[in-house]
Amino acid sequence: MSTPRTVELTLLASAEDELSRWAAVFSKFSAYEARLQILEACASRLGGFALKDYYDAFRVQPCVAVSELEGAAKSIVASLKTTGIHPAIALSALSREPLNDSERRNKGVYNTDFRLASRLSELAAPSLSYKSVVIDPACGSGILLVALSIAVCGESRRKLAHWLTNGVYAADQSASALRGTLLSLASLTDNVASLVEMRAKWLCGDSLLAEDKTWQMIAPSGFDAVIANPPWEKVKLSLHEFVKSSGHERHYGAEHGEFESSRFSSKKVEVTTYARQLISRYPDLKNGEPDLYVAFTELFIRLCRPGGMVAALLPGGLIRSQGTAAIRKRIFEQSESVSLSIIDNRMRFFEIDTRFKFLALAFQKAQSPKASSCRISLLHERGTDRGTIQTGSVSISLPQVRKYRADLSIPEVRNNREWELFKKIQDTGRRSDDSRSEWRPVYCREVDMTKERPKFQRRPGTGLLPVVEGRMVQHFRFGAKSYSSGSGRAAVWNSNGIGASELKPQFWISPQNISKSNVGRTTQPRVGFCDIAGQTNERSLMAALIPPGVVCGNKVPTIVFPDDPSEDRLYVWIAIANSIPIDWQLRRVITTTVNYFMLDSLAMPQIARSSLPWARLETASRRLHQLDTAGSTIDVKRSIAAIRAEIDAEVAVAFGLDVKDLLLILDDFPNVDGKQHPIRGESRSTITRDLLIATLCRRLRIEDREWQGRVAEAYAEGAEAYIPSEMVDEIDDSPTRKLRAIND
């Protein structure tokens, strides 16, 4: 996974270099203190106030002569004006406290990018005036308050003076962060008196533990708007991160000293105590490990007055995770309207994986709770170098959400067509957790490959069971990869070609080291699925039949059906689970893990056990299991592809889908066939799509020449359907392409 340098850091690089150079020259006390003082000098230059007056008002002891600070500020301000970022917003970004990666993760700090600050202020500003009262209760260096001030007051110094004096409130645990907020806002005004009055009302402390009377004293009727990017971290402590945060390099599994253990135990007590305090104050934290952003979201609702606005940046888990169901319910039932913008990190907003998704949430708090009146706007936005643009939208009513997602999780549909398709699948199928469902799976994690690692052995032995890991399981395939060498993240695994699966594990374990409740599973066939996945993967859900005589690691949860222990049901479930319609449905709700809760929430097609569709799926699934070790030949590959297309078409028909529906579904898998040869004159291969649509047309008895013709042409080019990209051979030996290469 990539952790990119942000666009913001790139744009500010020149100003950052200049600032760092001057801070090193002026570092009489500390480099960070010098840095803040230089930025305060920049603020005075931009705002038009005397730096000495500012320092006198806030009791700052200059680290060098004021004239020297002003001289440094001149060149930095000139650099800021070339970035394309508003200078006040740039000052906020430059005044952030320096944190290493471990500190950032432990505190859950994901600094707000200038583009997101502008976007969030756009969501909040329309309902505000310069006379409004607003707060950021986790303000950091104040970039959101700066952006909101600009959006509400524009360039009017009169409005800004009133706004800052009477309406802008901030809170943070760090006095240095509040200082950064102050200097950033100061760059918008020449009125030092208004800054003094504003700063006197701010809270330096933990907003989550502040007493209700504290907030009531600040804003008796509540705030007109709450804007924030709260910490995105669970309240927990791992030994690995604790040791790293102490400045030591450490890898997972490494030994630690007694001193570290003692300090860790003490710190863990502190963290546990804090978690208990939060849970007692914020009931929505009770399910699972407490998330700071969930507690903050509950605080936002409390702080916002009826009719007021909340705008926040939050992880995507808010709309999908099982543990956030309570806070979702609270938001929807206490809001007039909710806007949810889904944004990914491909345009480098944060220094985290580019595939990470997050939300720009905005909601208007209801005058009184109205359980069914909330209007939900689900937006999809894509980042640009300067902001975001909308790429999709759909309006969903709260009663509809309740009908299709009992936990009020929001499926990630991008437009009305996708929403109608999602509802069609839900209405036609039946969820596993529905009392009327014929599918009653029992899930199990058979061994934990982290907690139980000491029990594993590197060599096979009498009575030992092979351990199945996630990468060994793919669609209908058990043994898709073979262990070669190395360990941990450095382990080397070889891909086994389609039709050439083989069991070559990395570890073995004695049945005596498996819990009594789980060891019995190793004597029977069951379903196993890889639980690591994502919306942007080539495919998301991958399941296979797990034979007796092996045990599955925690990344391969297994499924049995106690009400029907026959292999028939296992094979049919595998066929349905591996189908593209089910995968599309899963991709509407998944983050990075396929969990039980998620699987149970998927609609399964209503196929009777004695029906012809059941028999077709069972036969096809069994045949794929046999072909899994039949040899990696062209005939085997094409037989497997044809059978998989038949399964996908059968499941589509069971859901009542037509060709247009399936084409819409297939649009959601852009990485499929990414390494296959395209038809001549086209830019990319669509062999899997073409084969599936041709198969569906045949199944529905629709006359078809186009899709069959495309399949034949693609095969002539050497393309093969249903082949994962990592399995594609580098050498193309198709006769047509060889002949064309000679002629060319």
Image (cartoon, rainbow, N blue to C red):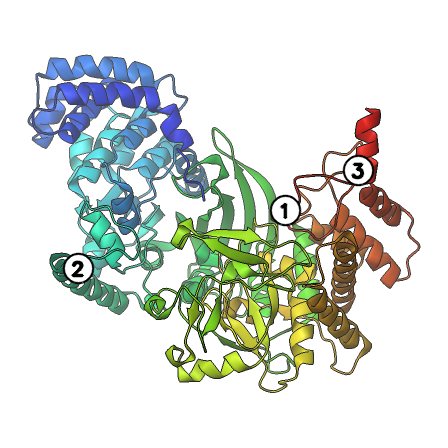
Give the camera-side residue of 471 and 400. 471
Q: Does label 2 or label 1 sit earlier along the sequence?
A: 2
The single residue placed furthest to the bottom in the displayed view is 563
What x and y, as percent, mark residue 3? Answer: 41, 40
What is the secondary structure assignment of the residue under circle 2? helix
Q: Amino acid at mark 3?
A: Ile
Give the camera-side residue of 116 and 264. 264
User: Closer to the camera: disc 2 or disc 1?
Assistant: 1
Q: Does label 3 or label 1 sit earlier along the sequence?
A: 3
- Name the residue carrying label 1: 725
Q: Amino acid at mark 1?
A: Ser
Q: Amino acid at mark 2?
A: Phe
Image quarter in which the N terminus is found: top left
Q: Which mark is residue 264?
A: 2
What is the secondary structure assignment of the residue under circle 1? helix
For residue 148, say whether it is visible: yes
Residue 26 vertical position relative to residue 149 in the rendered view, above or below: above
Separation of marks 3 and 2 at Cα, in angstroms: 60 Å
- For residue 685, side relative to residue 708 (left or right): left
Q: Does label 3 or label 2 sit earlier along the sequence?
A: 2
Q: Is the residue marked by circle 1 packed among few (<14), some (14-19), or many (20+) residues within 10 Å? A: some
